[in-house]
Amino acid sequence: MADVPTAIAHRGFAGLYPENTLAAVRGAVESGADMVEVDAVPTADGEVVAFHDERLDDGGESRGVTDREGRVWDRSTDVVTNARVLGTEQRVPTLESVLEVLPADVGLNVELKNPGTTAIRPFEAVDGADRSAARDRWTPFVDRVLSVTDASETPVLFSSFCEGALAAVRGKRPDASLAALVGRRDWEAGATIARRYDVEALHVPLEQVDNPTLASLADDLGAAVNVWTVRDWQEARRALDVGADGLIADYPGLDRYLSD
């Protein structure tokens, strides 16, 4: 475990600020985050925006985060970026605008959430032709993401639940920093993906934080273990007690009471 755990602001400390907004990013920086995590999806125009759900409204499994309707990737950039988030005046930002407000000494974790299709096969380690197809499905979106991140000096860590996303990044940028997101139940797939791409970090759910196989894997790879999603200091203590290197947290300062 690191002497001082890495503070990773989940969607920009979503417990304090409207998630995945510029207010959240700025607030996370002011609160002392070492890294800010945002989700990335495309609009119908191919722009990359910071947004988590499939839809702007509450259809399907989406939560109704904005005052607009429809799948994000079916709506124009203008519609998406004018959507109000969680009843505030904050709008859905582009990834480019997120990078513009981040200082160079604060990292960005881009979670590659969706390339614009429901056929993304999360929580699966795929083989053979299926893996190639998964990589190709993500590549156009990853190209756009990289065109944005390459223009910035901010250090970027790319993460995803989808093997195709990490395969596409590794294929385009062999030296990119990658993190394998491990599922709450389907953790074996995340472990397999982590080995395949020699990741720099494992993003482990709190439910799997004491999984000895994942701890051994992280040691073998020399990878950091960042735990998600940490919502209070008791969860922070649990994560740090078993050796977590970083906390992907909804609030800042959750380790402040853990020195005793």
Image (cartoon, helix red, strand yellow):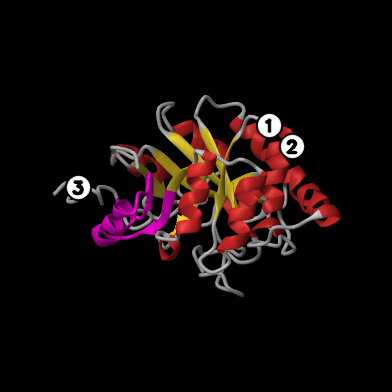
- Return the residue nearer the eye: 181 or 216: 216
Q: Quadrant of the N terminus?
A: top left
Q: Earlier in the sequence, mark 3 or mark 2?
A: 2
- 3 and 2 marks in contact (CB < 8 Å): no
Give residue 112's position: percent from left, percent from top: 61, 49
Which amino acid, mark 3?
Answer: Arg
Under mark 1, the amino acid is Pro
- Residue at disc 2, secondary structure: helix
Q: Is residue 1 shown in magenta?
A: no
Give left or right: position of 58 versus 87: right
Q: Is residue 206 left or right of residue 77?
A: left
Residue 228 lies in the magenta stretch:
yes
The 10 Å Cα crowd at callout 2, few under 14, some 14 to 19, many 20 or more, is: few
Q: Does the image show residue 77?
A: yes
In percent of the image, x 45 and y 63: which residue is there? 208
- Spatial separation of the CA atoms under disc 3 and disc 2: 40 Å
Residue marked by disc 3: 256
Mark 1 vs mark 2, CA separation in Å: 6 Å
Give residue 174's mark: 1
Span of residues in magenta: 226-251
Image quarter of residue 95: top right
Of 17 and 2, the residue lying toward us: 2
Sort mark 3 into few (<14), some (14-19) or many (20+) by Cα contacts within 10 Å.
Answer: few
How many marks overall?
A: 3
Q: In this orientation, which residue lies closer to the viewer: 39 or 195?
A: 195
Q: Amino acid at mark 2?
A: Gly
- Reading the image, the residue beneath label 2 is 171
Please indicate whether residue 150 sits to the left or right of residue 157 in the image: right
Q: Is residue 84 visible?
A: no
Q: Residues within 10 Å of mark 1 (few under 14, many from 20)?
A: few
